[in-house]
């Protein structure tokens, strides 16, 4: 095997640089910005924001420049016109650094993802905007996909090799290369090395690809024996579920939309992979499968519309529901097209999805504008319903006249609105200047969080604004609880309870006994005492002292806590809460059980417990740590 010389590699790199100067320039800018961001992490939030924007802009610039290059290569433009088009694309992409600001607007992370997705799709068809060339379009994207896999493989191998070498120098020579060295290494390999390898393999003569009839058999096998069976499994599950809800005459669950989208993705991907060989005599099954796939997809989309629509009518539109509805409409359009027309053009798939994605980013029809308007409308209608809207301004609500369910809904909606869009869009409904309110709240001294500096300050400020608005509007008597304004606001019905203080008063007890976490059975001895601990069903703790048993059920503590939601809400930790569970800091006395007999008094002190408690069902204990406190009598 003959290895390429350094000269050959250098010539290949220079050739790629000559073909894609704008693309590699953006790759270099993004790599440098990413490197500096690693070095400045948690040191300068303002600079971090610009560096993050630089990385995002570089990603978009590379994709848009590549699209412009492919488009100009496919047309008979002069060198001057090609340069003008590519320069305009690069300048437009560079200007996005002044528009995208995820530090100030959390929604810009989603906007960046949508723009990146749309520009990826643009790369897929930029060289094939004319009529025909469907086979060339397929061959081009197959080449891009395989080249991407190759560049990832090379990049991963290089990173692992160099990372092991760095680790070896740390071990052998006591060097101090830390995590940032590995992060920077990864950034340069992904940003420059893999990007260059990928660009070097992008087909230059896209016109000739239409005559390329080669087809790797592995793709057909992958589609036929992996993707199609997967989509069939999804279909059977969904059809059975659809039959179930028809029999029970109930609304479908929200998560059914994920299964429907999974069926659609696997099905469309499998059809795209076998597209070139669909006309061959031995592959007639492909056309049959395609017709059945789109035929069954239409009623499933109806199920998706019902599942999402029911939540839209009840809770309003959020970005996630907007995207689900937009994808459902797009899938319906694609299904009707492929069922109605015999002459089918697969270029329609990325082109239409690219347009749809771009429309959802900015403008009055975008996901963010529609969601903001929907949630704002819910808030305004609540104040109208309870006569708390005078002369177009909110006034304090008489909480004694507000239905508890409506109160919980409005504070949940307000919390979602402020966390997503800030309080400023509601300025027309407030007599107070919200900018001044924000400045005042921002000057209140907050705890210092060295690990998550910057993020928590913004999070805390949003939380402070929400709490201020809740109190100002007379809604402080209501709690959001688990009202599902957002599908992602609460993934599970999990709760975590832990001691508010780690200091315990052990006066009056002779000794403590901690069996440890995840111990089903344990035996210990202390002088003349033999202690045996047993855990049943992850919640029942049995302590046997010599021949005397003490049985504690941690569920008794949970039931007592859950019985008084208002009291429990006072212990909720707002800073520590996440989407997976509600976290509460409880006084130690409320997390203990005591038993005694003639010889011993035993207290079970729960330190931390995590449960899953769906409504109407018994809580499931997932985590429990505790200590026994024992006294002779």
Image (spheres, rainbow, N blue to C red):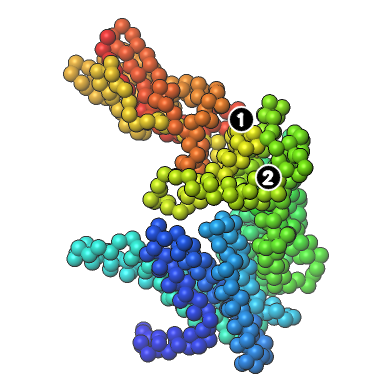
Distance in Å between CA atoms under marks 2 and 1: 20 Å
Q: Is there any visible trace of residue 117 in the rendered image?
A: no
Question: SS class of the residue under badge 1?
Answer: loop
Where does the image place residue 494, in percent across and percent down from the top left? Answer: 52, 36
Dot 1, how many residues are within 10 Å of its Cα: few (below 14), some (14-19), or many (20+)? some
x 53%, y 81%: residue: 22
Which quadrant is home to the C terminus?
top left
Vertical placement of residue 555 versus 215, above or below? above
Query: Which type of secondary structure does the marked residue at label 2 adopt?
Result: loop
Q: Earlier in the sequence, mark 2 or mark 1?
A: 2
For the residue pair 429 and 168, the one nearer the viewer reads as 429
Residue 190 quadrant: bottom left
Q: Quadrant of the N terminus?
A: bottom left
Q: Is residue 317 above or below residue 383?
A: below
Q: Nearer the viewer, residue 530 or 59?
A: 59
* Residue 517 location, quadrant: top left
x, y (%) of residue 246? 76, 39
The x and y percentages for residue 619 are 52, 29
Taking the spot 37% from the left edge, 71% from the top edge, the residue there is 158
Q: Residues within 10 Å of mark 2 (few under 14, many from 20)?
A: some
- In screen coordinates, is 113 left or right of 522? right
- Horizontal arrangement in the rendering, residue 467 relative to residue 628 (left or right): right
Residue placed most toward the observer, 294 or 450: 450
The residue labelled by disc 2 is 430
- Residue lying at the far right in this picture: please name it: 340
Quarter of the view holding residue 181: bottom left
Task: Name the residue that disc number 1 marks.
Answer: 477
Q: Which label is found at residue 111?
A: none
x and y, in percent, of residue 618 in the image: 54, 27
């Amino acid at each position: 095997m003959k290895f390429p010389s350094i000269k050959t590699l250098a010539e290949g790199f220079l050739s790629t640089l000559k073909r894609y100067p704008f693309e590699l320039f953006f790759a270099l800018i993004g790599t440098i910005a990413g490197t500096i961001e690693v070095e400045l992490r948690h040191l300068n939030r303002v600079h971090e924001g610009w560096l993050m924007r630089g990385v995002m802009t570089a990603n978009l610039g590379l994709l848009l420049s590549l699209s412009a290059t492919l488009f100009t290569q496919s047309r008979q433009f002069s060198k001057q016109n090609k340069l003008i088009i590519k320069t305009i694309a690069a300048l437009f992409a560079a200007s996005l650094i002044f528009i995208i600001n995820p530090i100030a607007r959390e929604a810009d992370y989603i906007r960046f993802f949508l723009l990146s997705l749309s520009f990826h799709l643009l790369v897929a068809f930029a060289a094939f905007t004319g009529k025909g060339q469907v086979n060339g379009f397929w061959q081009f994207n197959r080449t891009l996909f395989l080249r991407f896999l190759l560049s990832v493989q090379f990049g991963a191998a290089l990173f692992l090799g160099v990372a092991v070498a760095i680790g070896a120098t740390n071990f052998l020579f006591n060097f101090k290369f830390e995590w940032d060295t590995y992060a920077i290494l990864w950034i340069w390999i992904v940003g420059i090395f893999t990007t260059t390898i990928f660009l070097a393999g992008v087909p230059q003569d896209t016109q000739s690809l239409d005559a390329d009839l080669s087809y790797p058999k592995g793709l057909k096998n992958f589609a036929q024996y992996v993707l199609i069976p997967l989509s069939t499994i999804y279909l059977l599950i969904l059809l059975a579920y659809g039959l179930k809800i028809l029999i029970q005459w109930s609304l479908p669950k929200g998560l059914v939309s994920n299964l429907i989208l999974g069926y659609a993705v696997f099905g469309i991907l499998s059809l795209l992979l076998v597209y070139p060989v669909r006309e061959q005599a031995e592959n007639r099954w492909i056309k049959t499968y395609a017709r059945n796939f789109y035929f069954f997809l239409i009623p499933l989309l109806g199920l998706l519309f019902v599942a999402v629509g029911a939540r839209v009518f009840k809770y309003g539109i959020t970005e996630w529901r907007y995207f689900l509805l937009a994808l459902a409409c797009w899938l319906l359009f694609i299904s009707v097209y492929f069922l109605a027309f015999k002459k089918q053009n697969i270029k329609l798939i990325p082109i239409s999805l690219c347009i749809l994605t771009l429309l959802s980013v900015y403008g009055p029809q975008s996901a963010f504008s529609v969601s903001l308007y929907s949630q704002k409308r819910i808030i305004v209608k609540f104040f109208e319903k309870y006569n708390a809207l005078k002369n177009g301004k909110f006034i304090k609500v008489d909480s004694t006249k507000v239905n508890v369910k409506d109160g919980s809904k409005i504070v949940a909606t307000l919390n979602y609105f402020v966390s997503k869009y800030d309080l400023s869009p509601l300025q027309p409904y407030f007599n107070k200047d919200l900018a001044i309110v924000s400045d005042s709240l921002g000057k209140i001294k907050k705890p210092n969080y060295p690990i998550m500096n910057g993020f928590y300050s913004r999070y805390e400020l949003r939380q402070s604004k929400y709490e201020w608005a809740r109190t100002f509007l007379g809604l402080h008597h209501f709690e959001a609880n688990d009202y599902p304004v957002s599908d992602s606001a609460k993934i599970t019905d999990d709760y975590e309870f832990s001691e508010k203080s780690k200091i315990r008063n052990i006066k009056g007890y002779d000794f403590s006994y901690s069996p440890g976490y995840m111990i089903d059975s344990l035996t210990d001895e202390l002088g003349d005492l033999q202690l045996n601990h047993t855990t049943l069903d992850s919640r029942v703790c049995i302590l046997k002292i010599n021949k005397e048993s003490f049985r504690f059920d941690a569920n008794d503590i949970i039931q007592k806590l859950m019985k008084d939601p208002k009291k429990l809400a006072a212990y909720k930790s707002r800073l520590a809460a996440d989407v997976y569970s509600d976290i509460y800091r409880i006084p130690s006395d409320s997390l203990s059980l005591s038993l005694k007999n003639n010889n011993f008094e035993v207290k079970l002190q729960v330190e931390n417990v995590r449960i899953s408690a769906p409504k109407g069902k018994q809580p499931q204990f997932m985590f429990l740590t505790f200590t026994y406190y024992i006294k002779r009598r």
